Image: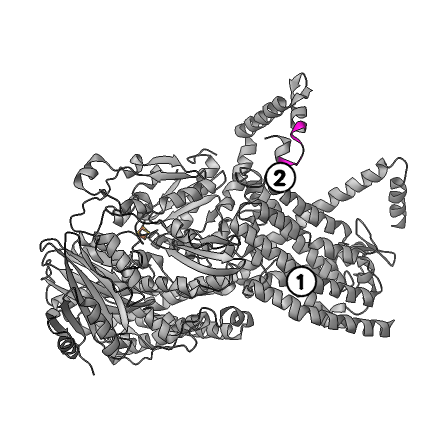
Amino acid sequence: MGISDVIPVPVAVDEEISKWTIFGQPVADVWFTTTEKIHQIIEMGPIKNIFNWGRKNSVYFLMQPMGCCGVEMFVFGAAPYDCTRFGCMPRNTPRQTDVMIISGYITRKYLPVIKNLWEQMVEPKWCVAIGECAISGGPFYDSYNIIQNTADYFPIDVFVPGCPPRPEQFLEALMNLQEKIKQRKDKRGY
Amino acid sequence: MTTASDVLSAVQSAFPGAVLESRVESDRRLWATIDSNSIVDVCKHLSEKLNFDHYSGAAGVDWIARKEMEVVEIMASHGAHQVVAMLKSKTPRENPSVKSLANLFWNANWYEREIWEMFGINFEGHPGLYPLLLGDELVGVWPWRKDFKGYPDLTTGQRAVERPTSEGYTEYFIPPTPAEIEAGTVPKEKPKYPSFREREEKEIKSDSEMIMHMGPQHAMLPGPFLLDILIEGERVHKAFLDMGYIHKGIEKIMENRTWLQGLTYTDRMCYVASLSNNECYCGAIEKILGLEVPLRAQYIRVILEELSRIQSHLIGTGEFMTLIAGVGYAPWNFMIIDRESIISLIESVTGARLTHTFVRFGGVRNDLPEGFSDKCRSALKYIESRTKEYIELFEQDPIYHMRMENVGVLSPDRAKRVGISGPPLRATGVAYDMRKEDPILVYPDLDFKVVTGTRGDSADRIDVRLREILESIHIIEQCLDRIPAGPIKTETKVPKKIPAGEAYYRVEDPRGEMGMYVISDGGDKPYRVKVRGPVYATLQTLPPLLEGVYIADAVAIAGSMDGCPSEADR
Amino acid sequence: MDGIIEAISSFASQEPAIYYLIIGIIGAVVLSAVVNIGAMYVIWLEVKLLGDFSARYGPNRVGGRWGLLQIVADAIKLFTKEDSIPASADKPVYVWAPIVASMATMLVAAAIPFGALYFNGKYYPLVVANMDISAFYVEAALSLLVIAAFMAGYSSNNKYSLLGAFRGIARMISYEVPMGVCVISVAIMAHSLNLAEIAQNQTLWYAFAQPLGFGIFIVALITDLGRIPFDQSEAEEEIICGYTTEYGGIRWGLILFQEYNNMLLGSILLTLLFLGGWAGPIIPVPGLSIISPLIWMFMKVVIVLWFLIWTRSALLRLRIDQVTDLGWKVLLPLSIVNLAWAVVVGSYFA
Ligand code: SF4
């Protein structure tokens, strides 16, 4: 991405900048190597822990009730169980969420939709499968329309058994996810 | 009072020879097989002359042994009399085709589409036979036919092929296995029809119009369905509804489970009203068996069903309030807190929060725990005061009136014609309640009135729900006073195999009229279970109601219907 | 105190102009630090208060029992999120929208007095740019955010965003006029357009001197801030998140942040115009007397904030046509009535 992508300047400016050098190297190269170095430093050490501390304490989930477990998701977000205590809030657009809760069955018709939603979420992101249906098809294991193996489509970090799980189990799943993020043991390795 | 035999003789005299077979089960149920050529005329006669103004649904049955298919039309009346006529028309299994009722009854449209996509029965004269519940890849498989064996094996996931679409998204495509092709579970030739997208895009008339998707994932929806609105600026010109995003095929699955196992699936149909679904299924089977339910069990059932109605209305209203107020709106949280107290009451009896599987053929699973009645009374007193507070709150809120009054108005006539039921129908002033119409259990002995509204708008729908909570509390209190001691299950042993027979049983679900049509062929599994859910009818009425309103009103209308897509999709 | 001010101004007026720039930069840094930290805690206050109104705790896991560090965690998360720009977005506009949003709030913050210090019987207002027409300027700059919102909504190439942006503009236009008329009425009574002077000239709070104007201003302010019952541009249940639907990560964080910044600045403006600003009895304790106007100011602002948050948990959302109706057909005539009232009363007191 050059400058002209962001500011409406002529492409010539981009070309001009690409000619500049610093310490005998093109500016762009220096820029990339430094950012890479910075990333390496972050990956190594305590800075990453700080990042993960922030991430773990602020997981927004995508409000997307799918099955019976979706009702328990509503309750989990409301007063009696109050997920905001953990810094976990429902948001409606996938762009602003960190964790997708698969709360029920995924049908053949819904799979492309939910996959789109998952792809629209910005990294880092996690996925939690709630209920038997999301794990293995549950009571609908032999249905012609239900996808049985959600884990093939999504990197699921926490599975919550139950049909439906209680809202307390939702909270436990959240805490497990937080622990995983903290120890950097989640599927996608953040 | 019109009874089933009156109706039968009237039809027989009007159409000599049209009734091939008939059975008068009771005063309230008429079973008749009608000559398939005259089914439309008979239905027309029934609705015009005999007050059958409620077309309540249709079911398809595949009689593979007899090499024929059957379409069962369910006709009832809005209060003029209590007869439910089940009219069957037969058609050969090869190239099945019957006459469509969609031109006669507006709401037959969706029921016939469902039968078409599931059984492949063609409806002559239907305005648009498009799939409703199934994705395009499954159309032509006819999954509810008895010879359908194509349950996906557990490797569907590994078989899925990713392919990018032209818009840059990823799509999934599950190619059929050779075994599936051999078994004939993949469609050999696909029916040709325009897709949902194409159908709605045809309606765009000018450059200033666009289609906005509300769903399948949208903050407005209580579950996934797709509501597309064609808007110009802030005005909705047309609305389109697509369902089936959580179609699980429950009716087909139940055919492959034993009678008792099937009960668990009724729980998962509408998960906030699972007790009335249980009741409906068990009631139908009790009818086939001719079982008497002991009095105590009847009372327990009524208590729990009313409790479940209260919690369903509370979460329905609460969820709706977030739609027109935002998630920060405090009363929504209060309603959930109130609901928790009811849920914990139900849990103390059934052991589960949502999926109870509590009602049994000829009784209930277990007795009320000790001290239930006191706990229940105190909780109900609390709920009563809170509900009155909510009613008062909404009455006094000027913004509430501005947003809700005269929005989405249904006139009584229109509401009857479109086949809607439950609170949306009662809000228009039609006192149509299964607990009075088709009384079951101990409801006839109890004193309660049917709550009705006057205007039929969104505000009335919410108001009816809230006042129904008060009515339910009244019912439960009576039950707690009267409940006798005694057994909670019938003495007669319920056989593993239910004798051949059929029954149609209706209950008043929190969302409206729910009926189950159960057929047994004498085996240990149901031959066919057809669920006539209230939400299916409610969702069907939604698109025409949204024409010409503002976007914000569309939300207010759709939310006030309290639709539960899971039950509509089954 | 006078000495300090003189020293600073003489430092700034040295040649070459670089000294002036230095002072300016220091001022800007201090200012943005104050405003942004303030906004962070407005967010915290909102989450906590909303929790309280709906019978729950709100964040209480990080930063002690009150969840004081929750907002820090949120900020870290947003900063370290992937930077995503939709492929079909209008890139330059998309990228610049959050920046314009922050610019808009900083423009407001520059001219608004955050309080005053009391020293030797004199009030020294804490303001970066003490303009003579600051009341007008602030009122105008407060609605600049809607331009950023429109940029965001238009460039995202998303139907929800576009609708949100349109709604935002429609709402802003219909409420800017009554709000401006209210500011004029206040200026007429105070004989000044300088916010610091308006605050100081209030012997009787203008909330009591012109209650009608006070009411109109509150409604218009809530509209300007886009909060319930006037949050149509972000109505979650209708158009997902309105103009921020396609924004994620820190870009969304910036926009969100500016909304709360604006909320803080708006409540300060309300306090200055109608609630007597920092006026209040001076606390006769040696150390505290200097900052006692600040304490009063702080208390009033918190009360206004509390009110703004309270409306969110207690009111329903209006429809967009009702909003514009209310603006043009009710508030505008009323604000003109209020203007007449202000002229009569103002000239009587003068
Ligand atoms: S796991 Fe059970 S409760 Fe959850 S969605 Fe599946 S069937 Fe419903």
Instruction: Find the magenta span and give its range.
Output: A6-12
**Residue C206 left/right relative to B131:** right
- Answer whether residue C39 is magenta in the image: no
Mark 1 CB within 8 Å of ligand 1: no
Alpha-carbon neighbours of circle 2 within 10 Å: few (<14), some, or many (≥20)?
some
Q: Which residue is mark 1?
A: C175
Contact, mark 1 vs mark 2 (Cβ under 8 Å): no
Work out which quarter of the rendered image holds the N terminus of chain B and state it: bottom left
Q: Chain of mark 1?
A: C
- Image location of residue C207, percent across then percent down: 73, 69
Which of C41/A46 is in front? C41
Name which quarter of the figure residue B410 lies in.
bottom left
Q: Which residue is mark 2?
A: C92
Q: Which residue is pictured at 87% across the width and 41% down the height? A: C12
Count the marks: 2
**Residue C257 left/right relative to B267:** right
Which of C228/B4 is in front? B4
What residue type is disc 2 on?
Answer: Pro
Which color scheme does this rendered protein use?
Answer: one colour
Q: Residue furthest top?
A: A24
Alpha-carbon neighbours of circle 1 within 10 Å: few (<14), some, or many (≥20)?
many
- Image location of residue A181, percent across then percent down: 47, 38
- Image location of residue A13, percent across then percent down: 68, 28
> Please, is residue A5 above or below residue C121 in the view?
above
